[in-house]
Image (cartoon, rainbow, N blue to C red):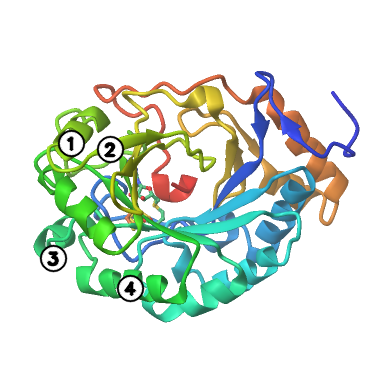
Amino acid sequence: MSSSPQVTQLVDRFGRTVDYLRISITDRCDFRCVYCMSEEMTFLPRAQILTLEEIGFIARAFTDLGIKKIRITGGEPLIRKGALDLLNNLGKVESLDELVITTNGSKLEEMSVALKDAGVKRVNISLDTLDADKFKQITRTGDLEKVLKGIYAAKKVGFERIKINAVILKNRNHQEVTRLVQFAIDHGIDISFIEEMPLGVVNSHDRAEVYYSSDLIKTDLEKTFSLHSIPDKTGGPSVYYNIVGTDSRVGFISPHSHNFCSTCNRVRLTVEGQLLLCLGNEHSVDLKAVIRAHPGDMDKLKQVIIDSMQIKPEKHEFDLKEQPIILRHMSVTGG
Ligand code: SAM
Ligand code: SF4
């Protein structure tokens, strides 16, 4: 075991540098998307989740250890009270190149200006359909109009980049991929299509039945758009294409059809303080236990993080036909 918290970069057993941390700051959400949550959710009790101060402390350990990009997510991060304070504090960390968030957009109309002021550079907004009824069916409780207003507000404040994330399910919204891309082009933003991942048990559909691959989406899009592959790596698993003649890019996140583990540069902090070394495996380290047993001990925390690199798995295994081996919902993990 190494004993030096002098380390300034996290490198795992496979030589991958880890410089990207995703933090779920709440498991709660104002939506109940069918691929993410069940209709009736039991959320975690307060004492079980990290306080915002604890999240800030852990984030500082990571930035000292060379993390350059932090994504704040959830659940819906913008419904956690104090989220802006946390973002303001993180926005002041000089060694951090990028502070970004993923949101369902429901609070963006009122919060975009404050987010920009806090130093948030890029925003990912989930939008699976432009049809208000379908939007309601997929999110169960969401209001499309409100989210669209949020997207317009985000555009207005001028984040460096805005990206739409769309999870595509066969016969729910696969027919809408062209329309969603046209929306992205019209608004000068990017879009990524995500294959559904078997995280947590959902009761609304059979995941194998609704699987719609990135390759199928790409074929659908190429009937209307010309896509040019670009080597653009945003530190994420997306494979990107420029939509010829536009400023917009389309990305594909394909955990099933294209394994992206060899270039994985990320780890995740769950709302319960578990450090997940891989989204598709149960390998984790309980950072909440460490900081609650050793309050304020930054060196101890850093050493545990450094040592955790030894258990980061080489790759994930997802099988849509099996019951999920990963029982965590995406909202706890931080999608
Ligand atoms: N509430 C925010 C939102 O919806 O953007 C942030 C959290 S959400 C868990 C982050 C991303 O995970 C969203 O883009 C969502 O579509 C995606 N997601 C949720 N469950 C998923 C699943 N089972 N498979 C693939 N993507 C999923
Ligand atoms: Fe909420 Fe995001 Fe999950 Fe939808 S995907 S239920 S908005 S956390």
- The mark found on residue 227 in the picture is 2
In the rendered image, is residue 179 in sight?
A: yes
Label 2 element class: strand
Observer able to see residue 196: no
Q: Amino acid at mark 1?
A: Glu
How far from the left and from the top, in percent, is residue 269?
59, 46
Q: Is residue 111 left or right of residue 131?
A: right
Find out if the beta carbon at label 2 lies less than 8 Å from the nearest ligand 1 atom. no
Please state which of residues 196 and 37 is positioned toward the viewer in this rendering: 196
- Determine the CA span between mark 2 and mark 4: 25 Å
Q: Nearer the viewer, mark 1 or mark 3?
A: 1
Q: Residue furthest front?
A: 245
Q: Which residue is mark 1?
A: 222
Q: Are marks 4 and 3 in contact (CB under 8 Å)?
A: no
Mark 4 close to ligand 1, CB under 8 Å = no
Q: Which numbered disc flags the more N-terminal residue, 1 or 4?
A: 4
Q: Residue at x 65, y 26 (%)?
A: 16
Specify the amino acid type for callout 2. Answer: Leu
Residue wearing tag 4: 152
**Residue ID at (48%, 66%):** 159
Task: Measure how far apart labels 1 and 4 are at the Cα level.
Answer: 27 Å
In the picture, the quarter occupied by the N terminus is top right
Local secondary structure at mark 3: helix
Please tell me whether mark 2 or mark 4 is closer to you in this view.
2
Query: Which residue is the site of mark 3?
Result: 132
| Percent of width and height locating residue 308 | 70, 31
Q: Residues within 10 Å of mark 3 (few under 14, many from 20)?
A: few
Q: CA distance from mark 2 to mark 3?
A: 28 Å
